[in-house]
Image (spheres, rainbow, N blue to C red):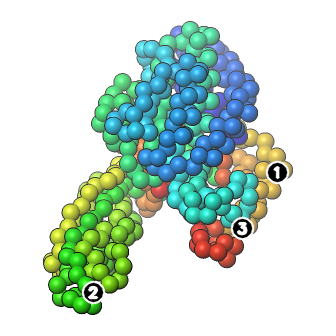
Amino acid sequence: MSLRVAGLIVACGLMLAGNAVAQDAAALAELKQQAIQEIDKRQIFTQQVVDQIYSYSELGFQEVQTSRYVTGILEKNGFSVERGIAGIPTAWVGSYGSGKPVIAFITDIDCIPRASQKPGVAYHSPIIEGAPGHGEGHNSGMAVQVTAAMVLKKLMEEHHLMGTLKIFPGVAEELLGTKAFLVRAGYFKDVDIVLGAHVESEFSTAYSTGNGEWSGLVSVQYFFHGRAAHAAGAPWSGRSALDAVELMDVGWNFRRQHLRLQQRSHYVIMNGGDQPNVVPSEASVWYYFRELDYPHIKELYDLGNTMATAATMMTSTTADHHLVGSAWPPFFNKVIAETQQKNIEAVGMPAWSDADQQLAKALQKEIGEKVEGLKLKVEPLKEPVKDPKGGGSDDVGDIAWNVPMTYLIFLGTVGSMAWQWPRPSRTKDQPQAQRSRR
Ligand SMILES: [Zn+2]
């Protein structure tokens, strides 16, 4: 399936190439056909990339094997690679060609915690209990993008097409940790368009705020500092950093009722102390504050800081906080989306095998969704909704506000945007493997 999608991206790239060959409609149609054929020839290669990245399943900032593998493929195929860009060890950019237009491909490569899963099994069955896994499908995007870039390079060589191709990984996307750094370091300054790809349960594209289920966010870690003491022998001498964490969380949860419905906020306690007989001198909590736009995100962030300060006052502790990630709400380009939509319709849906549909239906049954199998039709171009509700985030928004871009949503899974294995009794102590958007 991803093969034909990659062909689509190639075709989109060619359409926007803007040189003499690409301006000729007949030549363009022929190039698109050639692109589709070249993509189909690489079917086994693309599937191998999907499987290989799945086998690595590396969390954000730890995508060492994945990056080594993909950059190796690119170098072997005539791309130059710059590694460790923007001070991020697992980030890189692969480049080919020269001059305008500059077309960039981007897709995420990190996985999520505790999502280890045997491939092709329609119930929760981890390869390694508790290990990370590609529960969101970030193993498939790079297979699509690398195939597309390789085919586009071949066509550019054969037809003497000018232009530059760049390919970037989305490092630590689940942590919203890197794309702002890439932008700030100037890696998108000379880029004309960015073509993102993400797996989903449909074949589609969108522009503007899309389906309205996007939020921006800041990711903030609060570190509280108290004073250790024997919890029974001299509790009056101690000041509990954990108390401060709990009071901050309680304060936030009371305040939640009085926040806009569009907000999403959630936290995990990163450090709650060591053992009960020692008053915790250190404790920390990690918040994601999500809203639809910058002013509202900033309001939540300020409120979080207020809660933290208030918690220190109640507990005679101190606190500092680190902003560890951020994402602007994405805003996608209409011209690219409309062009991409035509190519989506021209390429069409894949022909699913009986085995594909059997697995998809088994999964749908397992997760309690309507049992209808994989979709058979492409989606119409998604018009931006008038009343966005918010939802997940993606730090690709930081790119989208600087360079025209949109996402190609390619079909490679079933289920709604977020799902979990519903029967924890199947495994002894792992309650769920979540597949959720960031
Ligand atoms: Zn994702």
Quickly name the residue at label 1: 355
Residue 243 spot, x, y in % from top left:
27, 80
Of residue 233 and residue 349, the one placed in the foreground of this image is 233
Give the residue drawn at x 48%, y 21%.
80
Q: Mark 1: which secondary structure?
A: helix
- Distance of label 3 from label 1 (alpha carbons): 16 Å
Residue type at mark 1? Ala
Quickly name the residue at label 2: 231
Residue type at mark 2? Ala
The answer to which quarter of the image holds residue 190 is top left
Q: Quadrant of the N terminus?
A: top right
Who comes first in sequence, dot 3 or dot 2? 2
Please say if 368 is above or below 335: below
**Residue at the extreme right:** 354
For ligand 1, tell me if the residue under mark 1 lies within 8 Å.
Answer: no
Of residue 247 and residue 149, the one placed in the foreground of this image is 247
**Residue at the extreme bottom:** 232
- Distance of label 1 from label 2 (alpha carbons): 60 Å
Of residue 152 and residue 291, the one placed in the foreground of this image is 152
Of residue 146 and residue 369, the one placed in the foreground of this image is 146
For ligand 1, tell me if the residue under mark 2 lies within 8 Å.
Answer: no
Residue 144 spot, x, y in % from top left:
61, 36
Q: Mark 2: which secondary structure?
A: loop
Please say if 236 is above or below 46: below
Pointers 1 and 2 in contact (C-beta within 8 Å): no
Residue type at mark 3? Glu
Who comes first in sequence, dot 3 or dot 1? 1
Quickly name the residue at label 3: 366
Residue 55 spot, x, y in % from top left:
63, 47
